[in-house]
Amino acid sequence: MARRQDNKGKTISQFVSGRKKLKALLVGDHRDSLNWGGRGQSIALHQLLRKRFEISGVIPGISVVSPEAVDGYVRTILPQTYFRFLVRARNKVKVADWYLKIEELFGAKDFVTDEPTESAEYVLRYKSTSKGLAEIYDLVINADAVVINGEGSGIFRTPYRRDFFFYLMMIELAVRLGKAAFYVNGIISDCPFTGRNSKNFNSARMTLKKCAAVLVRDQKSLEYLAREMPEVKCHYIPDALFTWYPLYEGSALNLPANGDFVIAPPEQDEYFGKLDFSRPYICMGGSSWAAEYQEKSVDSYLLLLEGLRKLGYPVYITENCGGDRFLKEVAKRSGAGLVPLNTPILTAGAILANARLFVSGRFHPTIMATLGGTPCIFLEAHSHKMASLREVIGYEGRRPFSALPSENEIGEILDLAQRYLEQGNTLRDRLRQRAMILCEEASQLVDYIVSRAETTYKA
């Protein structure tokens, strides 16, 4: 489930006195996902933490989102090995579905619930019978600080997000075991679809206030916490992905003129001969909101693509997340070049960083584009993240466009795109300058965690 190194009893008090180096457990490393943002920001955060900390262990994304990955079912009659097998067979084998319903009737459940204290108690109670829960416990015990990569999970929706409540469980477990917990690089938001889940909000409020620090990646999240959870020790630090700014200075040199050389396996026949990085191009991505309406989104993005082509550049579609799978159909129908989901992450970033324009509702890909000075047009997402990112980067004017833009909005998008393109290197230089500043600010994350650790353990 996780990667771990031995911790020989070092404590934060030893670290802050300068005798030992702090060991940190990183929770939520999403390199096991093909999502561009999950991969990019997880690597950036790991690299950033490693500058000051020794990483004693990592809990990967699959463990955060899947109870099967950690033998995470509790109160089961069958041993975990057999129970996990039946869960995987559910909806495929009738007898498995039938038996699991009986187990659930007698109380079998995922150990992650929407009550973080209860979830932490399950880890402590069932670690002797679950190898996965025992490993989570050991990872916390063998760390001095638990650093949680909050990313985009902190949304109070109905039903509750398992990833967010896994993180909250980790905070409760860390505090219970005498460790400092840090919730970093995240967003905190109500859900625009379902509204605020008040029960979950109250549970999260009680847990987040136990953190040594909650470090959010945008000002809107900071304002939300200050207004709604004033007891939480919160601070704004830009997303860790901004620290990749030095990687993308001159990154055009790393892009082959023939785009076929960036196609990742399995090399689909329809991908070849459609990407040319030797001449200017525009990129178009999806949106977490559009991902909710796959069939409807195809028609909307075909219209958007048709409009963008009027700007006189080839338009390449970037599949930034699994939810963007509708864009494969857009590429198929339009004949547009597709940069697929499994593209190597540094190459994916370079493609965005060297585009003339990027139109998207995806948070981290927009940061990647900005690192190279690419002007971005923002589409709505399922939270305030795109609106807040516009403010972080320093764009002015109207709010993000609809995730499924209408014909009228597409006209507005084209007008704005033309203005951006006409500004050329003047605008690109300004965006790169802003990215450099955000890189410097994001790099302060590790120092802030150290300072909060000192404050917490000296108190």
Image: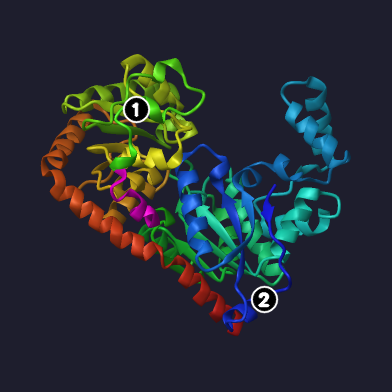
The chief SS type of the magenta part is: helix
**Magenta highlight on residue 211:** no
**Residue 279 drawn above or below residue 367:** above
Q: Residue at x 44, y 60 (%)?
A: 216
Which is nearer the N-term, disc 2 or disc 1?
2
Looking at the rendered structure, which numbered label has been put on residue 11? Answer: 2
Element at label 1: helix
Most foreground residue, 94 or 255: 255
Query: 10 Å neighbourhood of mark 1: few (<14), some, or many (≥20)?
Result: some
> Would residue 158 be found to the left or right of residue 354 on screen?
right
Q: Label 2 sits on what residue type?
A: Thr
- The residue closer to the viewer here, 27 or 11, is 11
C-beta proximity under 8 Å, tags 2 and 1: no
Name the front one of labels 2 and 1.
1
- On screen, residue 355 above or below 7: above
Instruction: List the residue tagged with mark 1.
Output: 259
Q: Is residue 91 visible?
A: yes
Q: Position of residue 273 (x, y in %)?
A: 34, 19
- The residue under the point 55% across, 46% down is 30
